[in-house]
Image: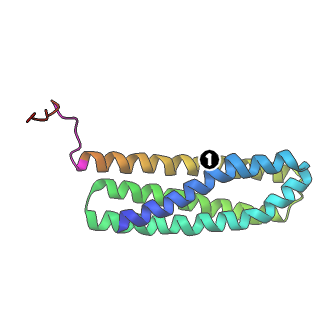
Amino acid sequence: MGRFLWRIGSGIWLGAILFFSLVVAPAIFLELPLSQASHLLIRIFPAYYAMGLWSGGLALVGSVLYAWYSREHSGWLLFAQSLLAWLLIVYVERLLTIMKRLSTTSSRFAHLHGESVMINTVIGIILLAGFFLESWVVKFRSGCRTPNRIPRIKEP
């Protein structure tokens, strides 16, 4: 159950990061002038980061359950990965509250925006690494190995 919750939470979060970063944000900046695009994104960010907090929280709870009940060291690595990603999203959410009070043309806003984009990218990489780690552990724990020979089908 814990691994399932971790997969759902991390999957939703990673999917949102990829969709927002690769589709939504570029489309907004291509279609609107910079000042209007910035105002629109500032309105979208609270929902985007709230979704990250909730899905990241689900992944965090799932990773704790998985680590506790599976008693495998890899479970604690997923917990550490989930905790790091969740703490980073909490930090970025705090940056957003500061950015709301600044002018979108100020240098401080530009700096905080760059920092939030960088952290968002790091979170995506952390989540992706978690999926690779989890799939690698499942593969080797279940004993999936390439057979030495291919069994032949007997002819009648």
| Magenta-colored stretch includes residue 142 | yes
Residue 32 at x, y percent in the picture: 89, 50
State the residue in front, 74 or 142.
142
Please name the colour scheme applied to the rendered image.
rainbow
Is residue 100 shown above or below 29? Answer: below
Residue 102 at x, y percent in the picture: 86, 61
State the residue in front, 103 or 25.
25
Residue 57 at x, y percent in the picture: 51, 68
Q: Amino acid at mark 1?
A: Thr
Q: Which residues are magenta?
A: 141-148
**Which secondary structure dominates the residues rendered in magenta?**
loop
Give the residue pinned by disc 1: 121
Is residue 90 shown above or below 25? Answer: below
Q: Is 34 left, or right, of 46 in this rendering?
A: right
Q: Is 1 left, or right, of 19 in this rendering?
A: left
Residue at the image position 58 percent from the left and 47 percent from the top: 122
Residue 143 at x, y percent in the picture: 20, 45
Residue at the image position 31 percent from the left and 48 percent from the top: 137
In this rendering, the count of numbered labels is 1
Residue at the image position 60 percent from the left and 63 percent from the top: 52
State the residue in front, 15 or 52.
15
Q: Is 56 left, or right, of 30 in this rendering?
A: left
Q: Quadrant of residue 4?
A: bottom left
Provide the secondary structure element on which disc 1 rests.
helix
**Counting other residues with Cα less than 10 Å from the Cα at mark 1, is it few (<14), some (14-19), or many (20 or more)?**
some
Look at the image and tell me in which quarter the N terminus lies.
bottom left
Residue at the image position 18 percent from the left and 34 percent from the top: 147
| Magenta-colored stretch includes residue 70 | no
- Furthest residue toward top: 149
Look at the image and tell me in which quarter the C terminus lies.
top left
